[in-house]
Amino acid sequence: IVLTQSPGTLSFSPGERATLHCRASQSVGSYLAWYQQKPGLAPRLLIYDSTNRASGIPARFRGSGSGTDFTLTVTSLEPEDFAVYYCQQRHIWPWTFGQGSKVEVK
Amino acid sequence: ESQLVESGGTLVQPGGSLRLTCAASGFPFSNYAMTWVRQVPGKGLECVAYMITTSTVHYSDSVKGRFTISRDNAQNSLFLDMNGLRADDTALYYCATGVLVGSFDSWGQGTLVTVSS
């Protein structure tokens, strides 16, 4: 299953709302996760199974979608939110990741 | 708190072999599916192998027949035996796990494998 993320790079100021998209080449049901990765660090799970925040993840991170179209929304960007975000499906092996969307400071 | 620590990455020549180890602690290791995920520096992420038990093992097409995943539940350790290494196997290799199979809430720091002559 190929996951396509858009846009590749997004530029925002702190406090703005960011919306990231992930489209699957076939249905993955609700088995889609979102990760955040900062330079030199492992990815961090934000959202699992489309809408569920992982432990310790702030409420400003919201996931939605099902089937083939999914969205990650950061309602008000904090300075620590500027990073690369990946979507990942666990519906069918091999579990696959999108190519990533970079959220950068405008 | 769960912790995963990978080791074994190094520089190896094309065609060579390597064993990666992931030491786990802080969670009931034997009950968890474990996955090796690799990342070419600056690029995306790829799941290459996962294991629940010895009878539930899966590989990506890119490593099938060359890599073998195994685990020692008594030692809380996960392994990846890599044979026939190629330049395109060069990557940072993470072990990862989570409460849900295929969803990764715990990651190691990664171990770097470089395949080059």
Image (cartoon, coloured by chain):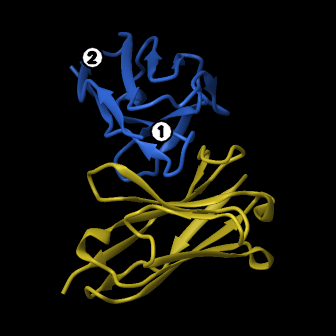
Chain colours: A blue, B yellow
- Identify the image quadrant of the C terminus of chain B: bottom left
Q: Nearer the viewer, mark 1 or mark 2?
A: 1
The residue closer to the viewer here, A78 or A30, is A30
Is B104 above or below relative to B2? above
* Amino acid carrying mark 2 in the image: Phe
Q: Position of residue A2 (x, y in %)?
A: 37, 39
| Tag 2 subunit | A
Dot 1 corresponds to which residue?
A88
Task: Tell whether label 2 touches label 1 (CB within 8 Å).
Answer: no
Q: Position of residue B79 (x, y in %)?
A: 58, 76
Q: In the figure, is residue A18 to the left or right of B71?
A: left
Where residue A20 sits, quadrant-wise, is top left
Q: Which residue is mark 2?
A: A12
Q: Residue at x 39, y 51 (%)?
A: B45
Q: Nearer the viewer, residue B58 or A22?
A: B58
Amino acid type of disc 1? Gln
**Distance from the alpha carbon under mark 1 to that under mark 2:** 24 Å
State the residue at coordinates (33%, 48%): B44
Q: In the drawing, does residue A50 fall left or right of residue B73?
A: left
Identify the disc placed on residue B2: none
Q: Residue at x 77, y 74 (%)?
A: B73
Chain ID, mark 1 = A
Q: Is residue B28 left or right of residue B66?
A: right
The reply to whether residue B73 is visible in this rendering is: yes
Q: Earlier in the sequence, mark 1 or mark 2?
A: 2
Confirm whether residue A83 shows in the render: no
Above or below, B83 against A14 in this view is: below
Image position of B70 (left or right of B27): left
Whole-percent x, y for residue B104 in the image: 59, 47
